[in-house]
Image (spheres, rainbow, N blue to C red):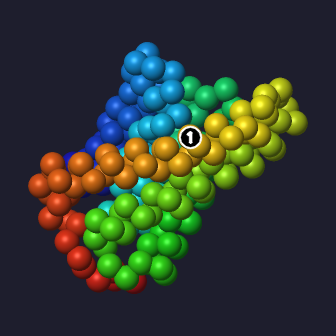
Amino acid sequence: MSSNFWKFLLIFILATLAGVVQITVLPSIHPIFPLLLNLPLLFFTILIFFSDLEDAILSAFVFGLFLDFYSQLFFGFFILVFIIEVLALKFFIHNIFQNKNINSLLIINLPAIVIWHLLYFILLFISAKFKEVNWDYYYSWQCYLNIVLQFIVHIIIIFLLAKIIRPLKNQLQPTIINL
């Protein structure tokens, strides 16, 4: 079997695991957890950081497809969000960051979260023509506080993963990014 199949299978398992935990486990622990920890976005950002554009697009499709199956929004919503996320983050990685290190991975989460919420808001606004949307949450201060807290939680998790997982720690040594 080719390595592309195994890569696809690994991405599919990771997307499934992140999606299942996000949809079922986190809300059952406490209703605020899914707002503070976006596992699909966190794992997806790490995948984008370490993979090339082709693998990042493949993972965007897989992660988006999985979330679209469980979404009330139009089919393709999350696929579109993840593909735009890939293009934007790859632009940041190749044009702004000079080294691939732990600091770059921590900082790339800020544009990832901002782009995620911005795209989500824009596409939700577009889909509001077809479905009733409650906008009260998006106009409240709690929405913006949750975005900041989500960034902090993602930074803590990435930092812990970098300290715990040895292969990730080895890949986060300062290296020049090849264009």
For badge 1, the amino acid type reads Asn
Question: What residue is disc 1 on?
Answer: 146
Relative to 74, 88 lies left or right: left
Task: Specify the farthest residue to the right.
Answer: 129
Query: Is residue 150 visible from the viewing direction of this image?
Result: yes
Which residue is drawn at the image coordinates 36% and 69% (left, top)? Answer: 104
Q: Does 171 sit above or below residue 33?
A: below
Disc 1 is placed on an element classified as: helix
Placement of 111 over or under 154, stated as above or below: below
Residue drawn 38% across and 35% down? 18
Tell me if residue 91 comes above or below residue 63 in the rendering. below
Left or right: residue 35 versus residue 1 is: right
Q: In front: 111, or 124?
A: 111
Nearer-the-camera pick, 142 or 51: 142
Residue at the spot 22% in from the left edge and 55% down from the top edge:
162
Residue 21, percent across and down?
A: 39, 27
In x, y percent, where is residue 4? 30, 54
